[in-house]
Image (spheres, grey):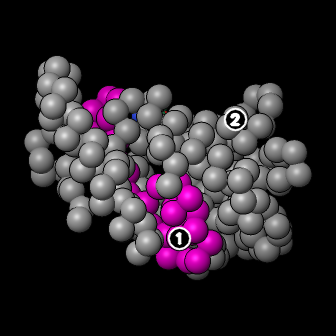
Amino acid sequence: MEVDTRHADLGKSQFETPCPYLRDKLNTIQNHDPIVGSSAAGRATRVWRGEPDTEAFAAALAAAMRADPTLANVYIELHGDLGAGKTTLVRHLLRALGVAGRIKSPTYAVVEPHEAGDLAIWHFDFYRFDDPREWEDAGFRELFASTGLKIAEWPDKAAGHVPTADLAIRIQAMTDDTRTVRLDAPTDAGRSLLLALTAGPTA
Ligand SMILES: Nc1ncnc2c1ncn2[C@@H]1O[C@H](COP(=O)(O)OP(=O)(O)O)[C@@H](O)[C@H]1O
Ligand SMILES: [Mg+2]
């Protein structure tokens, strides 16, 4: 079952109106009941009502990766308009994985490398990627073939180069703080990650 909040008139006023019953109900519908079933099929939806929810999701993702390091050797795509919260999610994920220091957005460099313990992480932002030769010249093919976590914002701008994502996260801003999120996991690794996520209490 999937709840499409775009058509559900979940405007700001409704979220800010104290209505615990409805809110709990929505939580149940969107964050618990159907997810276990649908994550087996590699799909799930989420509602993040503020950045703390986004941070909690990132923490759960990091916990799943720490519990099973093979789940950190994946490629994650982040889709969504400017300001949707892609970089924000990556920053929370990198922090939760243990990356220290300043986490720069890779918009100008296209890729920023990071390390968390043994885990190599590459954070791509293909927003300004427009020269296919750059794919080879910059060594992106090797990076994608390497062991480690690859995360990409604006992967559509590098279509034809990037591999199939293990986990595609589509973020849509509903209000200043609220985001609806679709998770698609077409590969075995992605499905395992999604299952590990949905087995946890918070994500
Ligand atoms: N629930 C939320 N999740 C993520 N970001 C949020 C949320 N609510 C508000 N924001 C704000 O939205 C902005 C998202 O910006 P950013 O992560 O740079 O977007 P993108 O990388 O998708 O262009 C940030 O200022 C962040 O603080
Ligand atoms: Mg960004």
Q: Residue furthest right?
A: 118
As drawn, is 112 to the left or to the right of 78? right
- Spot occupied by residue 152 in the image (x, y as percentages of width and height): 61, 57
Residue pictured at 36% horizontal, 68% vertical: 38
Q: Of label 1 and label 2, which has the lower sequence position? A: 2
Does the magenta-highlighted stretch encompass residue 4? no
User: CB under 8 Å between callouts 1 and 2?
Assistant: no
Callout 2 amino acid: Arg
Percent coordinates x, y for residue 136 in the rendering:
79, 74
Q: Name which residue lies at 78% across and 37% down.
A: 99
Q: Is residue 59 left or right of residue 156?
A: right
Residue 142 versus residue 169: which sits nearer the camera?
169
Inter-mark Cα distance, 1 to 2: 23 Å
Residue 185 location in percent, x, y? 49, 70
Q: Nearer the viewer, residue 68 or 130?
A: 68
Question: 40 or 51: nearer the eye?
Answer: 40
For the record, the magenta segment spans 172-198
Please name the residue shown 56% across and 77% down the image: 187
Q: Is residue 191 within the magenta segment? A: yes
Check disc 2 and report its element: helix, strand or loop: helix
Residue 100 image point, x, y percent: 80, 31
* Residue at the disc numbered 2: 95
Q: Residues within 10 Å of mark 2 (few under 14, many from 20)?
A: some
In the displayed structure, 77 sits above or below 14; it is below
Look at mark 1 in the image and give the residue it sits on: 191
- Mark 1 element type: helix
Quadrant in which the N terminus appears: bottom left
Image quarter for residue 116?
Answer: top right
Indicate the amino acid at tag 1: Arg
65 relative to 81 in the view: left or right? right
Label 1 crowd (10 A; few <14 / some 14-19 / many >=20): many
